[in-house]
């Protein structure tokens, strides 16, 4: 279920709250291969299925940055902010990949609103996205993402 928030004042009222979870999304070998093509990162642990079977993870794994690249999609599933003219990505304060994502696994993200700070014309928002691997106890990606919303 998407958390609906009205404007920057609505965001400020939600600081410290968990905003919910995205849907589960399967990570496919096709996605991994396309990401490798887009970034030029063709390391065998990602794209060589046969070699990866005898590698340290027992199967090919997704690039950490592929998982991070899901933030725009999952953020739209978690949060809808109305009453703004525009929102942009501004950066990341902290990023970790505590555990690998095997190809074929499903991930979802939870979002926690950490801060809303006034800036000229709007607000800078910090949301911690924690990506979970279905059936695993440890997160696969934790990112404190900075967004800017303008009125």
Image: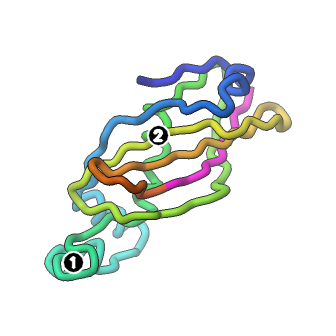
Nearer to me, 124 or 101: 101
| The disc label shown at residue 52, or none | 1
Q: Quadrant of residue 41?
A: bottom left
Q: In this figure, which residue is indicated by the disc labeled 2? A: 110
Chain part drawn in magenta: 142-151
Residue located at (73% from left, 26% from top): 12
Distance (Cα) linking label 2 and label 1: 29 Å
Queried whether the magenta region covers residue 33, the answer comes back as: no
Nearer to me, 115 or 17: 17
Q: Is residue 28 above or below residue 149?
A: below
Residue that protrudes farthest toward the right in the picture:
120
Local crowd size for mark 2, using a 10 Å CA cut-off: few (<14), some (14–19), many (≥20): many
As drawn, is 102 to the left or to the right of 68?
A: left
Classify mark 1: helix, strand or loop: helix
Queried whether the magenta region covers residue 145, the answer comes back as: yes
Residue located at (37% from left, 43% from top): 108
Expressed as whole percent of the image width and height from the top left, the position of residue 114 reads 67, 40
Residue that protrudes farthest toward the left in the picture:
50
Indicate which disc, 2 or 1, sits on the residue closer to the N terminus: 1
Q: Quadrant of residue 24?
A: top left
């Amino acid at each position: 279920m998407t958390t609906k928030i009205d404007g920057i004042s609505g965001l400020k009222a939600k600081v410290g709250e968990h905003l919910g979870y995205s849907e589960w999304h399967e990570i496919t070998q096709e996605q991994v291969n396309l990401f490798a093509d887009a970034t030029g990162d063709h390391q065998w642990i990602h794209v060589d299925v046969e070699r990866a079977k005898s590698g340290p993870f027992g199967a090919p794994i997704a690039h950490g940055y592929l998982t991070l690249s899901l933030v725009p999609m999952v953020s739209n599933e978690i949060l809808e902010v109305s009453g703004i003219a525009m929102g942009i990505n501004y950066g990341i304060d902290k990023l970790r990949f505590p555990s690998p994502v095997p190809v074929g696994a499903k991930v979802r993200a939870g979002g926690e609103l950490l801060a809303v700070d006034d800036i000229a014309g709007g607000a800078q928002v910090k949301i911690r996205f924690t990506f979970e691997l279905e059936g695993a106890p440890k997160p696969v990606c934790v990112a404190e993402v900075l967004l800017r919303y303008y009125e």
